[in-house]
Amino acid sequence: MSRVYLDYNATTPLRPEARAAMLSAMDVLGNPSSVHAEGRAAKAVIETARRQVADATGASGADIVFTSSATEAAALALANQGYLCAEVEHDCVTAWAAAALHADKNGHVRAEDPKNTALQQVNSETGVIHTLPEGIALSDAVQAFGKIPYAFSWSGAERAMISGHKFGAPKGTGALIVRRGIEVEARLKGGGQEMGRRSGTENVIGIAGMGAAAAAAARDVDAGLWDRVADLRDWLEGYLADAAEDVQIFGQNVDRLPNTSYFSVSGWKGETQVMQMDLAGFAVSAGSACSSGKVKASKVLLAMGHDELTASSAIRISLGLETTREEVERFADTWIEHYRRYKQRAA
């Protein structure tokens, strides 16, 4: 039986639109910094993608700075700024901002000083959506864009970061969105590419794919395609809750991404569940893909006030537009089978 991929918050399949754009860009010879015809052709590929990303993310009155990842975008925005954040943020944010803010039981964070605070639009583990205060210094929009309606222009943020492979672009692509008039100091210095904010010859092929994927992802959101995914997620959670009375589903009573379910059976280690599901043919995770390979409790759940045993027993299911009802049902039945075995051993 074929494997079932249920880890779309970690990465997504390459969209056919991105593949086509990348194949076309491979035939463009020039260096985009060169002034001759070949260079201008390469530059045109980048600027087409820049317009696509700007339009897709509602970034009117903002600049798109292409990077290698959201992690690089976070460093570009946050390094040496002394900003604040909470522990529910991704590691690439807490690496540069002081995690001094408090998260409530749903993972929501109150930013008293927005202009000196980094606050995520959506949490990658729980899927919980935040309402940003006006003027927030940086918003992590990695999980928001491509799954829910999103526009940088009304987000309230001065800067936001996105990651291409989360919405069907190739891995190794990302962007920092910067409101015009906001200063960003380059960390990579040299030729002055990307408006002097990120030197180095641009990844023309990857950027082309990112632009095409962004346009397609925005169309899917506008068409309401994620509503079916939300129905699948809600069915899954109801089915699991009926079979496992001690399962705890995080963020269930607040706005969440339509595709994300994060739950725990306290004492049944998340890593054990991930391995059991993998052997059974299902790709799931124990949290953020950047940290789920490490043996430790979820820092997000700990920040939300959960105990270490609960926080180390959580797994995340994240569905995609390609996910079918049959795949979700297969996963649910397999998980319940393993859950019952766990309960028998624990009795």
Image (cartoon, grey):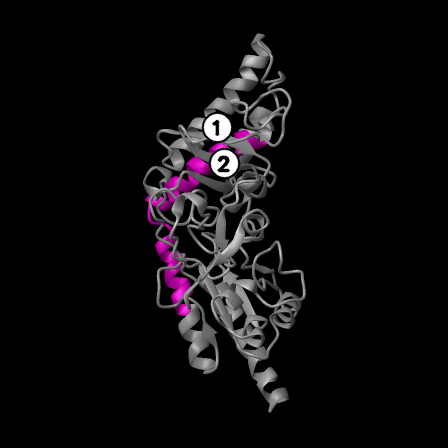
Q: Quadrant of residue 253?
A: bottom left
Q: Dot 2: few (<14), some (14–19), or many (≥20) neighbours within 10 Å? A: many
Which of discs 1 and 2 lies nearer the camera? The answer is 2
Say which amino acid is labelled 2.
Leu
Q: Main secondary structure of the magenta part?
A: helix
Q: Residue at x 62, y 20 (%)?
A: 191
For this orientation, the residue located farthest to the top is: 36
Quadrant housing the N terminus: bottom right
Write down the residue under mark 2: 176
Which percent across, then down, holds residue 235? Answer: 40, 68
Q: Which residues are magenta?
A: 206-235
Q: Residue at x 40, y 28 (%)?
A: 181
Q: Is residue 28 above or below residue 10?
A: above
Which percent across, then down, holds residue 138? Answer: 45, 43
Write down the residue under mark 1: 49
Residue 114 horizontal side relative to residue 280, left or right: left
